[in-house]
Structures are given as C-alpha cells and as structure tokens.
Amino acid sequence: MTYRIAVIPGDGIGHEVVPEALKVVQAAGVDLDTEDFDLGGARYLRDGLVLDDDTLDRWRSFDALLLGAVGTPDVPPGVIERGLLLRMRFELDLYINQRPFTYRPAEGDGHDFVVIRENTEGTYAGEGGFLRKGTPHEIATQGSVNTRFGVERCLRYAFALAASRPRKHLTLVHKTNVLTFAGDLWQRTFSEVAAEFPDVTTDYHHVDAACIYFVTSPERYDVIVTDNLFGDILTDLGGAVSGGIGFASSGNLNPDRTGPSMFEPVHGSAPDIAGQNKANPIAAILSAALMLDFLGEPEAAQRVRAACDAVGERSGSTTDIGDAVVAALTD
Ligand code: ATP
C-alpha cells in the first residue's frame, strides 16, 4: 500500500525536520507518494499567496497532510495563522487536535497522557469584531463559540480514545465556575456522553488547577479533553514538562474521514536556529508516527515511537538525530 501525502515543509526549521520524518517513515517500511506544497510566510512575502481554493480542493484527494512549521517574523501576526492553519482546520473539518505527552526520565516513573483539544470552535472561531476602531471609544469583542454538535463530537472522540487505553480515565478541563454558559454546555454534554462509556472513569479540573498539576503531578492524567483556547495553552505546558518543545507532536484529525487529516510538530519555524542543522526532528518524526496510526499502520507507528525512545534526549544535529532514529529502527 502506498499512501499519498501532501507535504508542506513551510518555513525555517520546517524544511529541516520534515525530510527527517519522511526518511524515518520510509525506513519503517511504509511507502509514501509525496507532493510538496510551497506555502507559509516565505511564500506569502514572495507573491502574497497564503492558501488558494485550488490547493485546498486538491488536498481533499490525499491520504494525509504533513506540515513542518509556518511563520516568518516579517509577516504580520494572524496572516498565516488564520489564512493557512485555521482555514485548513475549518475547511477540512479537522475538529480534533490530539497531542500525546510521554516522558520517561532516567529516575522516577514519568508520565504518558494525551490532550484532546477541540479544534474548530471556541474563541478561535473568529466571532467578534471592532466598533469605532482606531478611535478613543473603540470596542473589540471576541466571542467563544460552543455548539452542542461541536462539543459532543469532540467529547465522544475523547471518551472513545480513553476507552481504548489501559487506564481508561478521562478528565474534562474547563473553567466552569466563571465561564458559566460555555462551561455548562461542556459539563452537561460530558455527563451525558459519559453514560455511554461506563468503563471510563471521569474527573473534572479547572484549567488553572490543571496548570499546577501538569507541573507537580502530571502522572495523574490519562486523557484530557478541553476547548480550543485552553487546549492551545495547556499543550505548550505539556510539551515543557515532557522533555521540551523538540519532542511535542500533534495530529489535527478529521475522525469522520470526510477528508485528509494533518500532522505537524507543535513547535514553530524557530527562525533563531533555522538553516543551522540544529533543530530537534523528534517532534516531526513523532507527528509522522501519529500519521501512521491514523493511516492504519499502528505497528510501524509503534516501531517509530520505540526508535525515538531509544534515541531519547541525545544531542546532535538534525540529520544526526534522524539517522540515529533510522539506525534504532533497523537494529
Ligand atoms: P510560533 O509562534 O510559530 O510557535 P515561536 O517563535 O513562538 O513561533 P518556536 O518557533 O517554536 O516558537 O520557537 C520557540 C523556541 O524554541 C525558539 O528558541 C526555538 O529555537 C526553539 N525550538 C523550537 N523548535 C525547536 C526544535 N525542533 N528543536 C530545537 N529548538 C526548537
């Protein structure tokens, strides 16, 4: 079986880490037919293109998308984020953002948990606007959109994932004591969907408490489900307590498979180290492992993860670390 993958190396270290991820997938014995798409900050600065309708339509026929990192310091904030990343999520209906965090220190037990972040609604839906912009009386509003449909499908995915894991434990993270409307919808829907998954034990944490637990006792978590904004922030913290940004992987999933899903490391284009063969490619390689899982190649995905574990936190150049993972795979 050969999988058709749309590759968006993007900007900065994206161009360095993506080839390592592809190299490791090939070494794991999975055939990919790849096509590169030149998008991101550099492309925008060159000819003003962020994402055209034709490209978006062409992506629908691929099995998956693999993205390195997009963004350059010269592009105003929001242009690439909204025009490329958020547009991809909305138009390809990538309603789940799945970010696994595994940490096995030399001493102690470490942790192994997954954050499921709702990826198409909340404060990122683009609801709001300006009134009297640029005047002393200007007003900016940014609403949080939470639909029963969007919340329920996200919770259902999180419960099913928790049910498939040995600990079968799911924690809802929100701020229900202050965000009483959105929080109420999340909490009620959580309780209702829980009734369909009697094997899954459940818990609830306020997001501020979860930040403390991520640092003091992350081993308490198995699967966490949360909204778009809390998920964005919590997963950066998750990366920080799990070996650092160089190890954090993610999948933007369309679980209904009405189109391709997109896989990308959590880190950005890191302009400070770009072009120096210094970036850690493990986050991109682990993102490719998530892609293999989703394509129906769980055995190859597991082998790639084990090879990354074997390489551990070794320092070295981007290509050296990629080579070490390939060597560990074929050992
Ligand atoms: P963005 O807004 O796109 O996330 P950013 O500048 O906030 O961009 P990053 O690009 O992820 O965030 O960079 C943050 C810091 O982490 C930088 O110092 C960068 O060098 C470092 N960094 C990011 N990714 C890696 C990596 N794969 N290996 C090593 N260092 C990295």
Image (cartoon, helix red, strand yellow):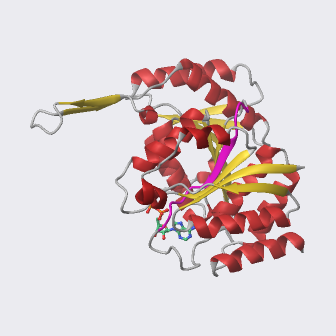
Q: Is residue 224 above or below residue 198?
A: below
Q: Main secondary structure of the magenta part?
A: loop
Q: Is residue 206 visible?
A: no
Residue 308 spot, x, y in % from top left = 74, 67
Q: Position of residue 285 (x, y in %)?
A: 70, 62
- 316 or 234, which lies in front? 316
For this view, does 330 lie left or right of residue 58? Answer: right
Query: What's the residue at 69%, 31% (across, down)?
Result: 157
Horizontal and vertical percent position of residue 49 = 46, 50
- Magenta segment, which residues? 257-270
Considering every residue shown, the one lying at the far left of the view is 136
Q: Is residue 305 magenta?
A: no
Point 84% across, 61% down: residue = 303
Residue at (57% x, 33% y) in the render? 91
- Can residue 77 be seen in this snapshot? yes
Front-lying residue, 140 or 65 = 65
Q: Is residue 245 above or below residue 59?
A: below
